Amino acid sequence: MSFKVPRGTQDILPEQTPKWQKVESVLRELSRVYRYKEIRTPMFEQTELFQRSVGDTTDIVQKEMYTFEDRGGRSLTLRPEGTASTVRAYVEHKMFGVPDQPMKLSYIGPMFRYERQQAGRYRQFVQFGVEAIGSSDPAIDAEVIALAMDVYQSVGLKDIKLHLNSLGDKETRDAHRTALINHFKPSISEFCNDCQNRLEKNPLRILDCKVDHEHPLMGTAPKLTDYLNESSARYFEKVKEYLEILGIDYEVDPNLVRGLDYYNHTAFEIMSTASGFGAITTLCGGGRYNGLVSEMGGPDLPGIGFALSIERLLLALEAEGIELDVEDSLDIYVVAMGEEAKKKSVELLSSFRAKGISAEMDYIDRKMKAQMKSADRLGAKYVIVIGETELEEASVNIKEMQSGNEEKVELSELVNYLLEHK
């Protein structure tokens, strides 16, 4: 019987992992620079956590969650996104009591959604995100957006565009909700079943529908920005002002609503504009979620964050033809001729690696010519051959593969030589 990787998942093979590691190192370094400290939460949570935070009218909750009962009869769900778990941990561990607020957190790890597999979209995917909890200052909104933009610019992407919108406060949302119901209700029978169900529960979600996005009423729907009250409009202007100070270009997109119920005020997405990237151009999305902390049982504190898929980031790099500068070099390959030479080679490899020198040798008893070819394929910078003569003289000829130059070095001095010439 043969087995294959489950549908919607992938194997990241050794020749691909250096790219992932490079991207992950960029993400961790930016988190360090911006002072977002890593938090690690479980891969599964109580199902109700996502139902209450993400929203029971969203596609994620209705169609995409991997939910199961454990042996104790408890309903658990593999996490479909990272914000809910992060906020849950923030409340549970009373992180709101830390003197220095906002609490700035980052996370990276697998998420799970049962959706149709497309280019760069999987049922298990790796998501990086940040959350800043405890501040209602529009400057922190701009900082979060700046961090997201920095991620893509740091890996060399140029064909990206920031879309920005304001979802306003509760008063704004209520006024806009009434207007949306009045707009769609007379013709709601022309829309899909999901939209019909959302009309009274959450009409804003109709604007995010993938089935009816070309319906004429979508283009004439009331814009949320037209219903912003004075305080919401003032907040949005402040966010835009800070983005301009940072030199970040943006486009106000009134149709940007985001797919999760917990968003309010600032909402944003970063899109790829590269030709051939695909129909779904979103690389990253985020926004403000005032009210979510209190919904989780904590104090009434605001928050803002974003999340991005590493798979889609790599796809964007491919679309722009960008090759990451990945570190996968081999410092030295040791060719051993004979059993005693092999024992010495094992000892040498250990001494090299103890000093951070990458080293390799043959483990399948190949001839010298085959071992030299292997060293060349692996891109070894240096090669040494150890046989009876080298053991007797306690020295070897070390060959630099690129130039072909050789130099005689005592075995006891090899580590120092490599450290000097690395």
Image (spheres, rainbow, N blue to C red):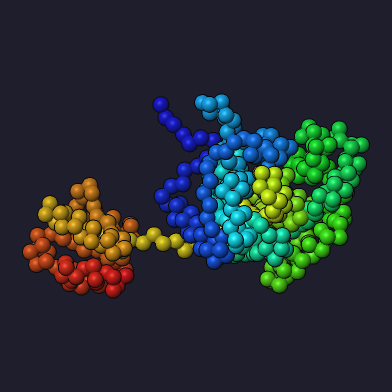
Give the camera-side residue of 348 and 298.
298
* Residue 349 to residue 194: above or below: below
Residue 236 image-quadrant placement: bottom right
- Residue 130 horizontal/vertical position (percent): 60, 55
Give the camera-side residue of 368 and 296.
296
Q: Quadrant of the C terminus?
A: bottom left
- Using the rendered image of the protein, determine whether residue 302 is visible from the camera's viewpoint: yes
Q: Quadrant of the N terminus?
A: top left
Residue 313 image-quadrant placement: bottom right
The residue shown at (72%, 49%) is 291
* Residue 16 to residue 145: above or below: above
The residue shown at (53%, 52%) is 39
- Residue 346 horizontal/vertical position (percent): 20, 55
Residue lying furthest left = 392
The residue shown at (51%, 26%) is 71
Residue 378 image-quadrant placement: bottom left
